[in-house]
């Protein structure tokens, strides 16, 4: 039954049926399946399959948009559950987070933000297509100790590098640890651009932010 519902969830994204995605997510939660398992086993494989179909020309932009709608409607149900499950007392740190300029991919970045706040971090999520100076201003304003930069396009990954340079020019590079992520981002890219860390997914982002904050 469990693996069946994951297949159905994944297919509902591939078939572009946001109502089914919502209903199946609710069904999975009601069946007691952990929200993170629903994301990892049901939703992510569906989104990845949609991405692959787009790459090979089988799907077009409207297909991506409708899949994203399905994912968002599922996240409406899952986010409060994720928050409920992880309440910690002391805050391990403050994170400024956003998707870099030129990039409007939101879902993964928001999931990282939800998981960080669910794990006690104070999170300032600046949204998508965030200009570099907005990151810098927010770090100054909040005294954040971690900066999380999301990029989903090979063309916007390079903005992560520019932001790290700008942090140095602004004289605040040593105050903030930079973590980078997003589908095309790799550990070796993170090293190449002088970031402090890379994580593949939202759970990894929490572990990394804890490590960078000296909290574990
Ligand atoms: C949904 C989607 C869209 C939606 C986004 C809607 C929204 N509100 O977010 C829309 C339709 C708008 C869109 C637009 C475009 N898209 Co698009 N999109 C996708 C798709 C199918 C899924 C992305 C997603 O939401 N995944 C689910 C989330 C949960 O996963 P995630 O984002 O990877 O995030 C996880 C990790 O990466 C990590 N992570 C993410 N951020 C961060 C940050 C930190 C700090 C850390 C530590 C970790 C971390 O943790 C997250 C949670 O586990 C991907 C395919 C794919 N396989 O990624 C293509 C994809 C990213 N898109 C692509 C393209 C080409 C585009 C367009 C250029 C298409 C066009 N011709 O217009 C535009 C770009 C618009 C722009 N300027 O940004 C390409 C990119 C190719 C490339 N190599 O550059 C992809 C890979 C599809 C493909 N295979 O061709 N897209």
Image (spheres, rainbow, N blue to C red):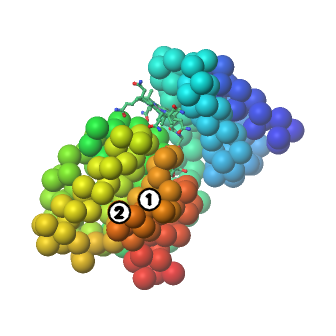
Q: Is residue 2 left or right of residue 55?
A: right
Q: Position of residue 14 (x, y in %)?
A: 65, 25
Depth check: 43 or 131 in front? 131
Q: Is residue 50 left or right of residue 99?
A: right
Depth check: 161 or 93 in front? 161
Image point (27%, 69%), residue name = 144
- Where residue 104 sits, quadrant-wise, is top left
The numbered disc on residue 51 is: none
Residue placed furthest toward the right: 1
Residue placed furthest toward the left: 170
Residue 122 visible in the picture: no
Q: Is residue 211 left or right of residue 136?
A: right
Image point (51%, 24%), residue name = 64
Beta carbon of the mark 1 residue lies under 8 A of ligand 1:
no
The numbered disc on residue 193 is: 2
- Where residue 167 sits, quadrant-wise, is bottom left
Q: Is residue 170 above or below residue 212?
A: above
Reading the image, the residue beneath label 1 is 189
Q: Position of residue 176 (x, y in %)?
A: 28, 72
Q: Position of residue 199 (x, y in %)?
A: 51, 61
Query: How many residues crowd mark 1 within 10 Å: few (<14), some (14–19), many (20+)?
Result: some
**In the rendered view of the protein, which quadrant contains the N terminus?**
top right
Image point (23%, 72%), residue name = 173
Q: Is residue 51 above or below residue 138?
A: above
Image mark count = 2
Image point (36%, 55%), residue name = 149
Tell me the SS state at disc 2. loop
The answer to whether the residue labelled 1 contacts the one labelled 2, judged by CB atoms less than 8 Å apart, is yes
Q: Position of residue 128 (x, y in %)?
A: 32, 41
- The residues tagged by marks 1 and 2 sit, at their Cα atoms, a distance apart of 6 Å
Residue 63 visible in the picture: yes
Tell me the SS state at disc 1. helix
């Amino acid at each position: 039954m469990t693996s069946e519902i994951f297949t159905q969830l994944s297919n509902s994204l591939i078939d572009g049926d946001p109502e089914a995605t919502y209903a199946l997510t609710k069904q999975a939660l009601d069946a007691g399946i952990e929200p993170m398992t629903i994301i990892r086993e049901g939703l992510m494989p569906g989104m990845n399959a949609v991405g692959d179909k787009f790459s090979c020309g089988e799907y077009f932009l409207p297909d991506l948009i409708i899949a994203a709608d399905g994912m968002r409607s599922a996240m409406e149900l899952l986010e409060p559950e994720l928050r409920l499950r992880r309440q910690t007392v002391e805050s391990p740190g403050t994170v400024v987070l956003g998707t870099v300029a030129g990039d409007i991919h939101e879902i993964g970045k928001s999931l990282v933000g939800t998981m960080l706040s669910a794990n006690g971090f104070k999170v300032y999520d600046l949204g998508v297509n965030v200009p570099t100076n907005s990151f810098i201003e927010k770090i100054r304003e909040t005294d954040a100790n971690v900066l999380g930069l999301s990029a989903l396009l090979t063309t916007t990954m390079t903005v992560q590098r520019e932001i790290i340079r700008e942090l140095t020019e602004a004289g605040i590079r040593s105050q903030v640890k930079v973590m980078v992520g997003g589908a095309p981002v790799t550990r070796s890219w993170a090293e190449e651009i002088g970031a402090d860390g890379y994580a593949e997914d939202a759970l990894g982002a929490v572990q990394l932010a804890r490590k960078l904050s000296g909290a574990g």
